[in-house]
Image (spheres, helix red, strand yellow):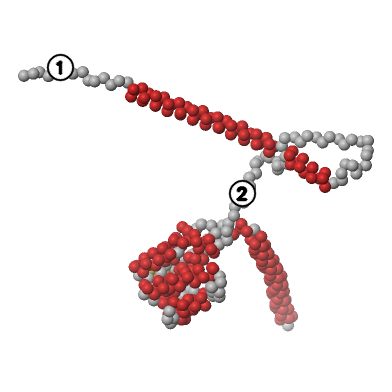
Amino acid sequence: MIRQKSSQFTALKIQSERKQPSELQRESQKDLSSVDGSVTRMVTGVRTESRTTASVEADEDPAANLFPPPLPQPRICMWKYLDIHSMHRLEKTANTEEMREVLAELLGLSYPEQSLKEAITLDLFSHALIFCRQQGFSLEQTSTACALLQDLHKACVATPLGNVEECYRYFISVLFCHGVRRPPFSINLFREEQLLALADYVVNTYFRHFKLYKYVFTPQVQLDLSLTYMGLQPPKLLPEEETEKGGEEVEQGVSPQEEPETGVQPEPEPEPEPSQVSSLQAYIRTQMNKELKQLQQLMEEQLQASEERLSSKLTTLERPSQPPSGKGKNKTK
């Protein structure tokens, strides 16, 4: 009996010891989860704050968007912007005006008559649709051609800087994604002659007027250039400017007759020392004078050499020409 009770007691003790570490593990896991949650919250908070600060800095600094953004990776763009239902609506149009109305609705162009950018965009895609109909493209090919042109236009207007070569390489790579059967990276949608016709059309219409599209759809860039010389202090007022400024202050202030008479005379103002800007201007003048003297000396030497050559040629021409002496008289028979 004593052995059975002792064995039961040891078993209960072992079970209680097993439960205790399990509870400790649960508590430690809870603590770790709470710590992880706080850390993730802190990280997300930092990310959101960094994003907001970056967006604010980008809005405040207009030069932050002047660098050309990276172009997207070339991918298959069939049914990307115009799906099958949109293509059926465009296929049912009877004339050009109806097609333009449906196309403006599909592209989200609300007022193409009033907005110059929307009118240019509508003209761009309407002429592309007319070209696709003339070439006999299918609905899939027409949707892909419009998507190619849309992606090219987005890459063009993404920056006001010149990126015509990058846009052309991007267009060619996207074009080949629809001419070679290599799924899932590319499909054989266009034939060789269709690829050539589409490439010629885009080059002769869009790339020929690439700078005009960029001028209309991108903001104007202005360069403000300021030069700072190392080791020089900011420019000071010249003596003439100081005297003019002092005269204006005297005119605006109290006249000397109204001032109370005192026996103390004002101390004479110290003469302004020559500023570093004036010394820099003097140095530039001396260097310019040296260069001008050297240039004048070189020109005089060249003129003297040309005069000597001309005089030598004139002396050779003025010499009397001596007739060639004959060896003997002709013999008479």
Query: Which quadrant holds residue 208?
Result: bottom left
| Residue farthest top in this picture | 328
Asked if the residues shown at circle 1 and circle 2 are in contact, with their CB atoms under 8 angstroms apart, the answer is no
Residue 244, placed above or below residue 191: above
Amino acid type at image mark 1? Gly
SS of the residue under disc 2: loop
Residue positioned 62% across, 51% down in the render: 224
Q: Which mark is residue 54?
A: none
Q: Determine which residue is flagged by label 1.
A: 328
Residue positioned 73% across, 39% down in the render: 240
SS of the residue under disc 1: loop
Question: Is any atom of residue 333 visible in this view?
Answer: yes
| Residue farthest front in this picture | 332
How much space separates mark 1 and mark 2, taking CA atoms? 87 Å
Question: Is any atom of residue 87 visible in this view?
Answer: no
Q: Nearer the viewer, residue 180 or 210?
A: 210
Give percent across and percent down for residue 191.
35, 70
Q: Determine which residue is flagged by label 2.
A: 225
Amino acid type at image mark 2? Leu
Query: Which quadrant holds residue 29?
Result: bottom right
Give percent across and percent down for residue 183.
41, 70
Binning the other alpha carbons within 10 Å of mark 1 as few (below 14), some (14 to 19) or many (20 upward) gives: few
Query: Which quadrant holds residue 67?
Result: bottom right
Q: Nearer the viewer, residue 138 or 99?
A: 99
Q: Nearer the viewer, mark 1 or mark 2?
A: 1
Residue positioned 10% across, 18% down in the render: 331
Q: Mark 1 vs mark 2: which is more N-terminal?
A: 2
Give percent across and percent down for residue 63.
61, 57
Residue 293, placed above or below residue 52: above
Report the quarter where the C terminus lies. Answer: top left
Q: Nearer the viewer, residue 200 or 251?
A: 251
